[in-house]
Image (cartoon, grey):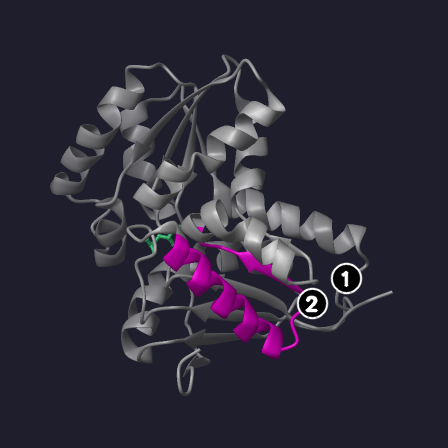
Amino acid sequence: MSDKRAIGIFDSGVGGLTVVKELMRQLPHEDIVYLGDTARVPYGTKSRQTIIRFSVENALFLLKHNVKLIVVACNSSSSVALAQLKRNFKVPIIGVIKPGAMDALKVTRNNRIGVIGTSATIRSKAYQKHILKGNRSAKVFTQSCPLFVPLAEEGWAGKDVTADIVKDYLLPLKKKSPDTLILGCTHYPLLKKGIKKFMGKGVDLIDSAMSTAKSVKQLISDNSLATPKNSNGKSCFFVTDETTQFKKIGEKFLGRRLSLVKKVKNGL
Ligand code: DGL
């Protein structure tokens, strides 16, 4: 059995392209329909109710494009809106939190796990809940790092100012001696090098974009949803604001040219 429909994926903006990049690598035959809610980004500073409302609208948009499953690439949406989305819609819906938490549990040796993310993600305690469900005796240390989002978008990963900010945010966390750190935000993989350098060799970083793509692959095979192997995956990108900025920044996140970017007509 096979299913030619596309994978739907949404994010608050450009960051979800880190998940798309991994999906393209791990599932090269699959078509992708991406929605970046660039008119309303950021989500990470917004309230739970607002993030849930936006997430439901994003999912409805993707379903109009006849997607076979939905990937919630945004950590902030996954943290607070996943349960509501699953209640509202019948298609399989997968978030980024559980895959990242499960991978962290596989990797940790001392059961001390750090989590960094937006304010909404950290406030929700979603990563803690999944980690503790998997191992009651794990110790979880969290830190919100809101400035990492604009730094990644500016392409400032290699600057001294970024190294200073990394140190400021992560020093209290480093003092707790975790051996594993979850990058719980779409943007943080772009700052991986600096974060790794500061945390040191003994700390493994979990890229939730990679973990999620692995889970999507599993879900597709478990549910016989794979597209026929002879097709070449096509991608289409929608945004809720103008396309220029998304294209410019997006290419850094995706690591390749972004050709088909369209603005959603008349909003969501
Ligand atoms: N995509 C968001 C996340 O992963 C980061 C950007 C935002 O705050 O909207 O939480």
Label 2 crowd bin: few (<14), some (14–19), many (20+), radius 10 Å? many
Looking at the image, residue 168 lies above or below residue 220 = above
Figure quadrant of residue 54: bottom left
- Secondary structure under tag 2 reads loop
Looking at the image, residue 215 lies above or below residue 197 = below
Instruction: Decide whether the magenta segment is chiefly helix, strand or loop.
Output: helix
- The circle on residue 225 is 1
Label 1 crowd bin: few (<14), some (14–19), many (20+), radius 10 Å? many
**Can see residue 118?**
no
Q: Which of 213 and 86 is in front in this view?
A: 86
Q: In the rendered view, does 62 fall on the left or right side of 196?
A: right
Q: Give the range drawn in magenta.
A: 49-74
The amino acid type found where label 2 is placed reads Lys
Q: Which of 21 and 240 is in front in this view?
A: 240
Residue behind label 1 places its C-beta within 8 angstroms of ligand 1: no
The picture places residue 221, in percent across and down from the top left corner, at: 77, 53
Mark in the foreground, 1 or 2:
2
Name the residue rendered at 52%, 30% in the picture. 129
**Can see residue 219?**
yes
Figure quadrant of residue 231: bottom right
Name the residue tied to disc 2: 68
The amino acid type found where label 1 is placed reads Leu
Q: In the rendered view, does 122 fall on the left or right side of 107?
A: left
Q: In which quarter of the image is the N terminus?
A: bottom right
- Tell whether label 2 touches label 1 (CB within 8 Å): yes
Looking at the image, residue 47 lies above or below residue 33 = above
The picture places residue 165, in percent across and down from the top left corner, at: 17, 36
Name the residue rendered at 57%, 57% in the picture. 85
Asked if the magenta segment contains residue 50, the reply would be yes
User: Marks 1 and 2, Cα distance to the nearest angstrom?
Assistant: 8 Å
Q: Nearer the viewer, residue 123 or 189?
A: 123
